[in-house]
Amino acid sequence: MRIRMVLAATVALSLSCGGGGDQAGQRTLIQNKGSDTLVNVAQAWAEAYGQIKPGVAVAVSGGGSGTGFSALINGTVDIANASRAIHESEIEEVRAQRGAEPKEFIVGHDAVVVFINSANPISSFTIDQLAQIYGEGGAFDSWSDLGVTVPGCPSGEIVRVSRQNNSGTYAYFGETVLGENEFKLGSRDMNGSKEVVDLVANTACAIGYSGLAYATDEAKMPCLMAADGESCVPPTIETALDGSYPVSRPLFMYTAGEPEGAVREYLDWILSDEGQCILVEKGYAPVRGGLTCPTPAAG
């Protein structure tokens, strides 16, 4: 594992102020990069771990699952975050560039939520309807195609909000909803998960998709049906964990080879009850049921 030792005077000063670090003033730095879906909880994990292990700093950045895998291949990160499974071509590149097998850790579960503007009267979608909206050649381009008029959307156009193609959420939504079909051209492609929800919340004509942790009262989250006539399942932590929500998925961290030392300890802590309760607090589903987390103190 590429664990860098930072000896800069500024770091040593911060450690002495915080009461951590080893006797030599050294601090272990773990580089962690990738999925924008995971970036909020990854930052929360890093901050909490810094309190537990002041001698270990975790540097977190987003950019998308593909960006994380590229960094893992290039050897510039210790841990890559991903909201999709690693592709076979990426596995081969890790083998070729790092001389190691990628090691996969499932660190949580998520629901890819469909968001619509709060003015939109729709309360449910089928997977096929979403495919008709987002898929190349799909029949739905106006809200009237679904039998509704959206207040504040005089054109009636369905404004499709999506993610850039290096996003694991983009890839997973395409695989699960569109199957072998491609995305329609002309969507508004956002860099991050939060940007999708913000745009939908402020655009009456819009529809978008993002992770459950980015839910907000400013946008609606319709339930989804796998097919006509089936139960309409709302996106929740429970339905993401049990897989009943049609677009639920695991969330991953990857290392190049079996992690050791500080990286292994950090991943073990993320999978512990303490780390998983932070995940739940941020709006994701844990890796296992039966988790008992403390109730946040009232503000």
Image: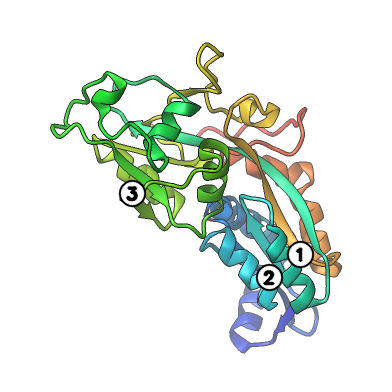
Q: Which residue is label 1 attached to? A: 255
Left or right: 194 as drawn, with respect to 213: left
Q: Element under label 1? A: strand
Disc on the earlier residue, 3 or 2: 2
Measured in 3D between alpha carbons, the distance from the residue under mark 2 to the one under mark 1, in whole angstroms, is 7 Å
Q: Residue at x 21, y 22 (%)?
A: 149
Q: Which residue is label 2 attached to? A: 72
Measured in 3D between alpha carbons, the distance from the residue under mark 1 to the one under mark 3, in whole angstroms, is 33 Å
Confirm or deny contact between disc 2 and disc 1 (CB under 8 A): yes
Q: Which residue is label 3 attached to? A: 187
Name above or below for residue 225 compared with residue 268. Answer: above
Residue 159 image offset from top left, x and y in percent = 28, 41
Name above or below for residue 68 compared with residue 161. Answer: below
Q: Determine if residue 119 is in view.
A: no
Which amino acid type is shown beneath numbered disc 3?
Ser
Name above or below for residue 244 compared with residue 155. Answer: above
Q: How many marks?
A: 3
Q: Residue at x 53, y 48 (%)?
A: 169
